[in-house]
Image: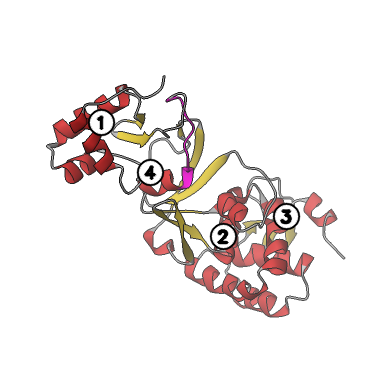
Amino acid sequence: MKPVGLSATSRSQLSRLLRDSPSVVTPSEVATVLGLTPALAARRLATWARAGWLVRIRRGTYVPVPIESESPDIALEDPWAIAAAMFEPCYIGGWSAAEHWGLTEQIFSALCVLTTKRPRDRKPVLRKTKFELRTVSPSHFVGLKTVWRGGTRVKVSDPARTLIDMLADPTLGGGIRHVGDMLASLLKEYSKETARLTDYAASLGVGAVYKRLGYLLQRDHPDQSALIATCQTNLSSGYAKLDPGLPSDRLITAWRVWVSASELREAKP
């Protein structure tokens, strides 16, 4: 149904609330903007939702319905802005950041969000949009850029930080083969960013990053001698799998990394 009419007072209140085009509306925001009690603010939101001007996406959280919409059964207009409002402190990372920076042409069905929150549901679906949530420490909030999505500021990992996150956890890039392709894109398209790879690796403090990065560089990009040398210098003790999601039956002792036979066969000359 299309939104129905409101009283003059209700329409004025809704206009004040949406003046700055917020992506998400909550009772606390309504209470602050309109000077209402929390209980009255919640009832006012429910009324606007029943009238079709807002859509409830989860308890206590609503989004405005675009005025041109024929139905309140809408997809989220901008999932990035919704993520920033609902899961803060957070940033867009992994495959979603890689898509943003043009590091991959792969199509991923969910928005990858790294947050300090520990949600029960790590794969929520909100109004037809899939989110995948990963919990990170506040100390990991380095190497981020701020972009504007409508009137909302959203943090996204920069190209080099995106790669380091995916090297720490290859599932963030859809597996190490995709991560290797994105590393190649980074070296080609963002050559000035490459020096930051080892800076972010040191900041993250995950030893497996140096092992995976060094192996991939030596295998596919042997001309990156300075980066390879830094990885070698910072090798930690112990062993890691190149991709924890794949069978690994060959040990590359130089990098202390276990790889699959297929990865060896795919190595470039």
Answer with left or right where residue 78 lies relative to residue 168: left
Residue 162 placement (x, y as % from top left): 56, 60
Of 60 and 55, which appears nearest the observer? 55
Which residues make up the magenta segment?
72-80
For discs 3 and 4, the disc positioned in front in the rendered view: 4
Q: Amino acid at mark 3?
A: Val
Query: Quadrant location of the C terminus?
Result: bottom right
Query: Quadrant location of the N terminus?
Result: top left
Report if residue 77 lies within the magenta region. yes
- Point out which mark residue 162 bears: 2
Residue bearing mark 3: 259
* Distance between the alpha carbons at the discs numbered 3 and 2: 22 Å
Q: Are marks 2 and 4 in contact (CB under 8 Å)?
A: no
* Distance between the alpha carbons at the discs numbered 3 and 4: 44 Å
Q: Quadrant of residue 97?
A: bottom right
* Distance between the alpha carbons at the discs numbered 4 and 1: 14 Å
Answer with left or right where residue 73 lies relative to residue 49: right
Residue bearing mark 1: 45
Q: Is residue 253 visible?
A: no
Look at 45% across and 25% down and name the residue there.
73
* Distance between the alpha carbons at the discs numbered 2 and 4: 25 Å
- Point out which mark residue 23 bears: 4
